[in-house]
Image: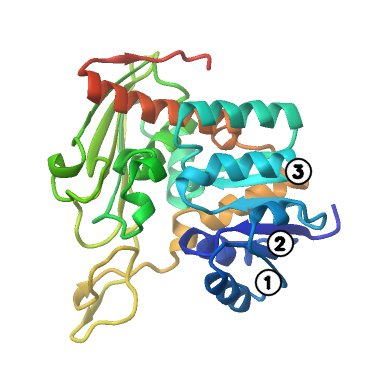
């Protein structure tokens, strides 16, 4: 494919911005359109990223014959709706997590993807985070022996977006919004777990810190795989000091630990503070460890480069990024919720 791949982004807010920044680093790609119902946000986005076309209604954008890939960067509850519309219009899709907010919507996405035959790229950035890519290569060469226990966590102090605070918009709380990252990475490494045990704060007044959140502000899932391997996934909104993403993998011959957000060599002491340290950090005074390049360290740049290469037929799509993978990862999160509600272990179909 010699002509540039044309990208249309749906959503001109937070996720749309870091996708636009990351697309800029990918060869043979051009963001040519953006859609957002907020006219001011859309116009500012177009100006900032030099995007020639803007649409108020994403349905008009997906019909644009010049667009090859629709990049879905809208609130969770719209992921299925926009993805399906784009696929039905014959467009390939990149979609931010989560895959959908309900299993019913997830099943519909898989059905439409299989029916249309277009490419669907589930954007789990942890699969492409350089530290975790290196970790996977060390595991595959036997550097820590056989992994027997894995721990993964994403946490921060809570989203300010109203969409993240209402279950009808988000699908839940910290599990579906944050713990879905370690769930996706462990699925990529190990496949589908056999059983899931979950425990979550109960939302609202029963949360640990955030009564205004309808969904849980803390949750964990314990995953057991067919070979006996265990994994723990955690998502919480009770962590001060900025985003905290960590992975630990314990093997028969060693231990591997990765810090995705604070694993950099830069430390700064500032009396007055400065502009930005890391996502969700409350202040920048005193000693801080600012991110050097979040878009790279969290995998966004390499993720979108991989999707572009798949579109060109240069790379084979990684198994943790397919529509079927996105649906299975959603099934894991749903099992955590069911286990927490029902107080019992949930058995999963592993051929799904």
Residue occupying the point 54% across, 61% down: 16
The number of discs equals 3
The residue shown at (73%, 27%) is 115
Residue 271's disc is none
Residue 240 in the image: x percent, y percent?
19, 59
In the displayed image of the protein, which residue is found farthest to the right? 2
Mark found first going from the N terminus, 1 or 3: 1
Q: Is residue 81 found left or right of 172 in the rendered image?
A: right
N-term mark: 1 or 2: 2
On screen, 254 above or below 111? below
Pick the front one: 11 or 59: 59
Q: How far apart are the two marked residues, 1 and 3, measured between alpha carbons?
A: 22 Å
Estimate the x, y position of residue 10 in percent, counting from the top left. Answer: 60, 56
In depth, the one of 173 and 246 nearer the eye is 173
Q: Nearer the viewer, mark 1 or mark 2?
A: 1
Compared with residue 300, is residue 79 higher up or lower down, i.e. above or below?
Answer: above
Label 2: which residue? 27
**10 Å crowding of disc 2: few (<14), some (14-19), many (20+):** few
Q: Residue at x 37, y 18 (%)?
A: 225
Judge depth for marks 1 and 3 and give the one in front.
3
Residue 210 visible in rendering:
yes
Q: Is residue 141 visible?
A: no
User: Where residue 99 sits: x, y (%)?
Assistant: 51, 38
Q: Which residue is labeled 3 in the image?
A: 89
Q: Secondary structure at mark 1?
A: loop
């Amino acid at each position: 494919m010699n002509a540039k791949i044309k990208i249309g982004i749906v959503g001109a807010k937070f996720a749309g911005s870091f996708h636009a920044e990351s697309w800029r680093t990918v060869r043979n790609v051009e963001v040519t359109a953006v859609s957002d119902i907020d006219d001011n946000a859309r116009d500012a986005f177009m100006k900032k990223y030099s995007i020639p076309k803007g649409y108020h209604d994403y349905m008009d954008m997906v019909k644009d014959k010049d667009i090859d890939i629709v990049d879905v960067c809208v609130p969770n509850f719209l992921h299925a709706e926009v993805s399906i519309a784009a696929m039905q219009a014959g467009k390939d899709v990149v979609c931010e997590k989560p895959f959908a907010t309900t299993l019913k919507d997830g099943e519909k996405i898989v059905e439409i993807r299989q029916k249309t035959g277009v490419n669907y790229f589930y954007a789990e950035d942890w699969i492409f985070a350089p530290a975790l890519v290196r970790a996977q290569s060390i595991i595959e060469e036997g550097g820590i022996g056989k992994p027997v226990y894995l721990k993964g966590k994403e946490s921060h102090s809570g989203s300010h977006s109203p969409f993240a605070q209402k279950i009808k918009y988000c699908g839940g709380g910290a599990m579906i919004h944050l713990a879905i990252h370690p769930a996706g990475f462990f699925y990529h490494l190990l496949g589908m777990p056999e059983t899931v045990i979950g425990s979550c704060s109960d939302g609202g007044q029963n949360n640990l810190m955030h009564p205004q959140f309808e969904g849980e502000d803390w949750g964990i899932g314990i995953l057991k795989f067919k070979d006996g391997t265990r994994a723990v996934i955690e998502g919480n909104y009770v962590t001060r000091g900025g985003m905290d993403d960590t992975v630990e993998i314990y093997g028969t011959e060693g231990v591997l630990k990765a810090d995705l957000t604070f694993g950099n060599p830069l430390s700064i002491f500032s009396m007055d503070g400065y502009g930005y340290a890391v996502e969700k950090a409350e202040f920048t005074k005193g000693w801080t460890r600012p991110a050097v390049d979040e878009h790279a360290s969290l995998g966004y740049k390499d993720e979108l480069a991989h999707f572009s290469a798949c579109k060109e037929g240069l790379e084979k799509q990684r198994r943790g990024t397919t529509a079927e993978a996105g649906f299975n990862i959603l099934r894991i999160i749903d099992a955590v919720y069911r286990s927490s509600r029902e107080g019992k272990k949930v058995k999963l179909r592993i051929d799904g």
